[in-house]
Image (tube, rainbow, N blue to C red):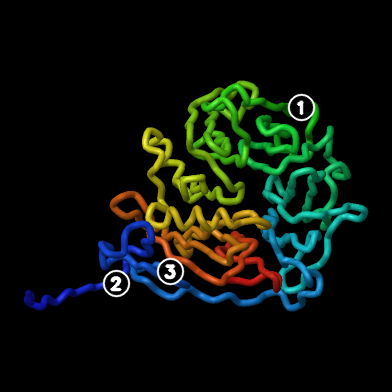
Amino acid sequence: MAQDRQNITIAAPAFRGLNTQDSPLSLDASFASIADNCIIDQYGRIGSRKGFTAVTTSTTPIDGSNGIEVIKEYIDPVGANVVISAGNNKIFTGTTTLTDATPAAYTITANNWKMVNFNDHLYMFQLGYEPLIYSQHTGIVEKMSDHAHATGTPPEGNEVLAAFGRLWVADFSTDKSTIYWSDLLNGSGWSGGSTGSIDISKVWPNGLDEIVALAAHNGFLIIFGKNSIVVYQGASDPTTMSLADTIANVGCIGRDTVQPTGTDLLFMSNEGLRSFGRTIQEKSMPVRDISKNVRNDLLYINAQQVNSPLRSIYSPEEAFYLLSFSDSKYVYCFDMRTALEDGAHRVTTWSDTTLRALERTQDGLLYVGNTNGIATY
């Protein structure tokens, strides 16, 4: 039977972003089933993302490789900051021209470095490699054992955190539950002084886990396992720090997905992109996450990752968190201005986009790494 025709007014189509989780038959018009190469703009509308402007003028140092896979800005105390990058099994300085800064007689066969600034130095860690150091006063990248203030044997961990006045290192080839910390204000000091370590194998809430990432948040040391989270308080004095909390059945599956947003920590779990603050408040309901509307797609694409780790960045200037699946050439863009009513955040995708490195500089510039070197968003 014929019905009266009704007019439907949609002021801002798809302003809630992408939703592939719910049935399209009942999908509200405020959601989009496809939102590709889009962002949520400052007015809450679907808009076009920006493009990428190449910075590197010569690709010769990275030809025949995946290009630049790690980017980090070295923060110089007098403002002469330097961009350090890694790719093609080399360490580079510069952006327009990539200058090979790999130490002599130092062989690299992987580019999954974790780089952190600490006490006027840039420290570089990767599983199974002696750590590297860059500082402006030497102007070179050197092995940690060659550094003037080095003591002891530096740990060859895959994860490093600069917090509470020292470096914290974890995730070793044969030990996934021990954290080592350096001497106070000396990231190359690993014996004597206030150096030490802690084995957390006895405090995993599920009995067994392995460290993936470390973070500092609200004065706490946050230890992300694959399937659980351990929180320590009093980390400014590691010898007396104590267990503050444990969270079972929620963990982190990507070291480089952990990003501080100022008031929260975001990380990728085996249930989607999670908020640490929300996890602490609602640990009895672990299924809630900020990627709720694209959760299955997110996990499916992550399962296709084979050769490249997940990369992420949070940009307060752009008000988004980017999660890059470079093997699948997909980037998920989460708008971080405000959450939806159910706690999820609005999300769009960038397809056919291979971003193997992401870095926000001190002045708010967003660098990306690809097969052509370094570019800006």
Circle nearer the N terminus (2, 1): 2
Residue 133 is situated, as x and y percent measured from the top left of the image, at 79, 49
Alpha-carbon distance for marks 3 and 2? 13 Å
- Name the element at disc 3: strand
- Name the element at disc 1: loop
At label 1, counting other C-alpha atoms closer than 10 Å, the crowd grade (few under 14, some 14-19, many 20 or more) is few
Residue at image position (57%, 39%) is 226
**Residue 80 in sight in this render:** no
Residue 77 is situated, as x and y percent measured from the top left of the image, at 69, 53
Q: Look at the numbered discs 3 and 2 and tell me whether their residues touch, using CB distance below 8 Å.
A: no
Residue at image position (83%, 34%) is 153
Amino acid, disc 3: Ile
Residue matched to label 2: 13
Residue matched to label 1: 193
Residue matched to label 3: 39
Describe residue 295's horizontal placement relative to residue 14 as left or right: right
Describe residue 202's horizontal placement relative to residue 114 as left or right: left
- Name the element at disc 2: loop
Amino acid, disc 2: Pro
In the drawing, what numbered circle is on residue 62? none
